[in-house]
Image (spheres, rainbow, N blue to C red):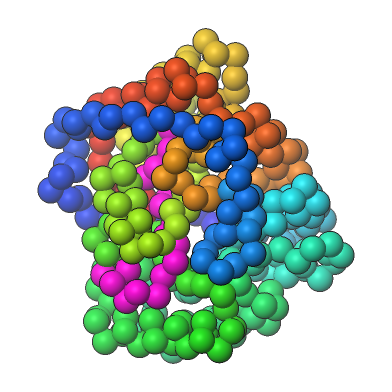
């Protein structure tokens, strides 16, 4: 089973974000209007456009080879039938690629945009090449390839070799675009300088519980002309179906400041008569700096709820501003990537 907390606090603190420092509130950037919210955009320059919401397959990978495998395949198909044609996976998500590969073989509709990643923590060029070919065997054509969890100790020589290899895949038409997935801001900056990456995934650092990525990853990404892909709108499940369990016995990975913010978000959702999951997903999708949102689902019912949040459209301006304020209350440790 994939450990969803494997990267929590794996990255070093930065001088600008020590736990004992108060944060200067960021001014509210107004939410998108309906036209921009529902706009069809290309995930990377030159690619076919898609909706701004995509299915993340981390949870679904756990269903491969189990009695619930068919439910996982139906979740993929439900998203694609509804026109959400980008799907994101990784070899690090257990057997996620295998389940997605089976779903692709059975699918008869328009071909989805398939995104996967290199091995986690970058084992070097040899590991990247080996894993890429393994992913192709499982998935067929790969459209988007991200460097996953880029390690801070990768040598400049190794980084250059990996970037050259990925650039070659693009030149040969093997993949359409490359991105970064899960790297912290300092590491991301080093990789972006290669000039080949067209999107970067922020992991739990941008959403209804934290706006950390607005300080570093988002401006870095935009400065290099790349798209911002925001992952885990439910903050690793803290705003999802297991919230009661997490609040009763918080995993050590959840800092108290995040627990307090979530409780405040629950109250706010009640005041506005909106579910907390819809509040979190719609808030992230309403942010002008976000080009694409990756939302996980473990079954067709969960995906239906995610889709319903998208279909409800952008948050009202007042509610959006209230969530923006909550996401900055209290000092917080640096998290995610």
Tell me residue 259's x, y (percent): 38, 28
Asked whether 296 falls inside the magenta stretch, the response is no
Classify 267 as above or below 241: above
* Front one among 311 and 257: 311
Extreme residue in the front direction: 35
Tell me residue 162's x, y (percent): 39, 83
Quadrant in the picture for residue 273: top right
Region rendered in magenta:
190-208
* Front one among 123 and 43: 43
Q: How many marks?
A: 0
Classify 235 as above or below 279: below
Q: Classify residue 91 as left or right of residue 235.
A: right
Quadrant in the picture for residue 176: bottom right
Q: Quadrant of the N terminus?
A: bottom right
Classify 177 as above or below 259: below
Q: Classify residue 205 as left or right of residue 330.
A: right
Tell me residue 249's x, y (percent): 45, 30
Classify 164 as above or below 308: below
Tell me residue 133's x, y (percent): 59, 85
Extreme residue in the top direction: 271
Instruction: Name the residue at 77% across, 47% down.
Output: 82
Q: Is residue 106 visible?
A: yes
* Front one among 288 and 11: 288
Instruction: Name the residue at 65% across, 29% down.
Output: 312
Q: Is residue 62 visible?
A: no
Q: Classify residue 221 as left or right of residue 50.
A: left
Q: Quadrant of the C terminus?
A: bottom left
Instruction: Name the residue at 69% across, 74% down.
Output: 139
* Front one among 136 and 34: 34
Instruction: Name the residue at 51% across, 72% down.
Output: 177
């Amino acid at each position: 089973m994939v450990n969803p907390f494997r990267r929590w606090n794996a990255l070093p603190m930065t001088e600008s974000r020590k736990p004992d420092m108060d944060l200067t509130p960021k001014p509210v950037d107004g939410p998108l209007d309906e036209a921009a919210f529902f706009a069809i955009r290309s995930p990377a320059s030159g690619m076919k456009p898609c909706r701004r919401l995509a299915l993340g397959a981390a949870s679904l990978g756990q269903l491969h080879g189990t009695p619930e495998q068919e439910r996982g395949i139906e979740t993929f198909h439900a998203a694609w039938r509804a026109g959400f044609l980008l799907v994101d996976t990784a070899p690090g998500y257990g057997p996620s690629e295998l389940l997605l590969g089976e779903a692709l073989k059975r699918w008869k509709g328009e071909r989805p945009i398939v995104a996967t990643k290199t091995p986690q923590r970058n084992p070097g060029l040899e590991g990247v090449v080996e894993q890429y070919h393994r992913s192709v065997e499982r998935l067929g054509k790969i459209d988007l390839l991200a460097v996953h969890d880029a390690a801070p100790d990768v040598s400049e020589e190794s980084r250059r070799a990996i970037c050259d290899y990925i650039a070659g895949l693009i030149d040969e038409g093997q993949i359409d675009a490359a991105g970064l997935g899960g790297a912290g801001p300092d590491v991301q900056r080093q990789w972006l300088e290669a000039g080949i990456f067209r999107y970067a995934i922020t992991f739990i650092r941008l959403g209804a519980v934290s706006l950390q990525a607005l300080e570093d990853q988002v401006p870095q990404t935009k400065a290099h002309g790349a798209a911002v892909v925001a992952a885990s709108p439910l903050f690793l499940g803290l705003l999802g179906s297991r919230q009661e369990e997490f609040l009763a016995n918080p995993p050590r990975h959840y800092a108290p400041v995040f627990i307090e913010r979530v409780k405040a978000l629950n109250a706010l959702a009640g005041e506005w008569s909106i579910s907390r999951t819809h509040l979190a997903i719609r808030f992230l999708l309403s942010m002008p700096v976000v080009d694409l949102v990756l939302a996980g689902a473990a079954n067709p019912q969960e995906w239906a709820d995610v889709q319903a949040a998208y279909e409800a459209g952008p948050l009202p301006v007042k509610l959006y501003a209230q969530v923006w304020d909550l996401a900055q209350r209290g000092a917080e440790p640096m998290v995610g990537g």
